[in-house]
Image (tube, rainbow, N blue to C red):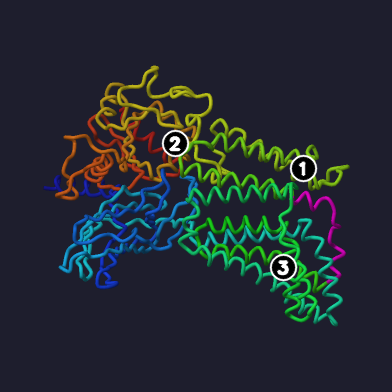
Amino acid sequence: MKKILSLLSFLLIFTASYAQIYDPVQWSTSVEKISDTEYDLIVKATIEAKWHLYSQNVPEDGPIPTSFNFEKTDKFELVGETIEEEGHTVMDPVFNMEIKYFENRATFKQRIKVLSKDSQKIVGELEFMVCDDTNCLPPTFVDLEFDIPGEKVAVAVADSKETVTPIKKKDTSTNKSLLTIFIIAFFSGFAALLTPCVFPMIPMTVSFFTKQSKSKAAGIKNAIIYGASIVIIYVLLGIIVSAVFGADALNALSTNVWFNIIFFLLLLVFAVSFLGAFEITLPSSWGTKVDAQADRGGIIGIFFMALALAIVSFSCTGPIVGTLLVEAAAGGSQIGPIVGMLGFSLALAIPFALFAAFPGWLNSLPKSGGWLNTVKVVLGFLELALAFKFLSNADLVLQLHWLEREVFLAIWIAIFGALAFYLFGKIQLPHDSPLTHISVGRLSLGLVVLSFTIYMIPGLWGAPLNLISAFPPAQHYSESPYGVGFTKLGGGTSTNNHEELPEGAHVMAPHNIIAFNDYELGLAYAKKVNKPVMIDFTGHACVNCRKMEQNVWAKDKILPILKNDIVLISLYVDDKRKLEDGEEIESKLRPGKKLKYIGQKWSEFQTIRYQANAQPFYVLMDHNEENLIDPAGYTPDVDEYHDWLKQGISKFKK
């Protein structure tokens, strides 16, 4: 009896050490009557803290989107698409795309038109995927049921058997995104201040207020009103952009092909303008009329003085403002353009207000000169580089492979290389003053740009370039995903020392690891070469799996082990390829349902055998399919992952 109790205790402790059955989303349905013939089918998700649910609108090759499939009958018809809430839209550096997700809760609505007055039951199926900072769950299916007319009907979802382990919250909230927009816009405002259209206007503005103000107190008051007027003008512009587009349109900007192409062309025009080909100006009559109003004096006159600044300086501030509005709008937040214009206008207004209030400070300002045009040209090069990011977004969405990673990096190397030559005085543009010598500041900036250019060059041969990972396409979106100059079996040793791959194996890019996607074939090969098996439960859309592959597997102390000491079997739980006829089996987790896809098969295999449903999930086992060491999940610490591998392999060798 004691032996049995000891064995049970051991099994409980052993299972608890790695069992991770997560169920972080609870679903419910309800029906809302809109009219005698129209109803809204409402599906609500309650999401546990630190998890996020992906939107219906996710770019191709991204995470699994939330999707709805309603079983159609002749008693009703769908009206439009399923709508969803605003959510959060962020740039995901792993997938290298803008991705929308929901936290805490989400509501989806599908309008229907009933074609029969009889009460009826509408059924459907929901597919979704959730992730947190360390885990992604496989695509999960939930049955939906609505009664027309109906009261709330709870959706049956299996109760979670495990408590979600507290983990660090992902630092990609809307608040942070808005703060980032504000900071970038604020520094852009200072950059605009140093352009030849704006900087010379500082002494002119000071002269205006010095003559108009009868006392120092009046001068400070007028200066504050002037600065506030500048802020109001630009914030109003941000409000107009937000109101015209609306939240839904702004959320669609990041992945809409035509918007990205339009933004590319727009920034291209801005860049060419800054480089000196032409100037973007507003009609001169606007400035004349505003100047006439500025002569009225008082608060109204000061406001029109600020408006005159905005109009006269438009040829320099316009491209910067346009770029900020594009970037803020593409962030997906409806108030992004407003926050951007607030940051920009504050940076522009504060110096004008201070110099207007304290004219004596003018003596400390550098004199106008050719350096102002240099600032403008540098901004032009930056606009040009940023333009190709939007073109890259369009190419990624369409999967045209016209602007793959190497091409994108080659363009950026050319742009920043040309900028370095310009700063060193080797290139001159139309509005440049003769350059007799290079200042220390210009030389220093040139060296920084040259260093950045040289840093990007190894990226052509597969270097990760972590400093700019959010800008170029991902490494797999490349002409040479295995690295330039490498073949599938070149560039290092591998599990197989022969030229031909074993049956059922493939080479995993970009690390050149031989892997199996079939469990039985991988296990048979491991027995043949007498090596332990590492099962890698992963997913094409698993962001944390990609993090492990890019940041841990690629390390020098890990990669040789994966190539030489184990046989890797990667089982994709979101593989949407259908099981062949005769292979379809009944689900053990959802009685009455059949497994249709390969991914469902591997997901159930992981859940039933290992009592875990999160990815990544790694198992080291021997040829009898017994675990050599407790399975591991997301392990970003390279040393910890290395120790886990070594311990499992050493047990196999005993």
Looking at the rendered structure, which numbered label has been put on residue 553? 2
Q: Is residue 630 visible?
A: no
Label 1 SS? helix
Is 185 positioned to the left or the right of 371 in the image?
Answer: left
- The amino acid pointed to by label 3 is Ala
Question: What amino acid is labelled 1 in the image?
Answer: Leu
Q: Amino acid at mark 2?
A: Trp
Q: Quadrant of the C terminus?
A: top left
The magenta stretch is 359-376
Label 3 residue SS: helix
Q: Is residue 402 above or below residue 113?
A: above
Q: Earlier in the sequence, mark 1 or mark 2?
A: 1
Q: Is residue 405 visible?
A: yes
Query: Between marks 1 and 3, how big is the CA–CA gap?
Result: 29 Å
Tell which of 562 and 411 is nearer to you.
Answer: 411
Q: Residue at x 49, y 57 (%)?
A: 171
**Badge 1 is on which residue?**
423
* Residue 524 pos. (x, y %): 25, 25
Picture residue at 76% right of the left edge, 79% below the top? 221
Dominant SS in magenta: helix
Which numbered disc flags the more N-terminal residue, 3 or 2? 3
Say which quarter of the image contains residue 294: bottom right
**What residue did someone put label 3 on?**
349
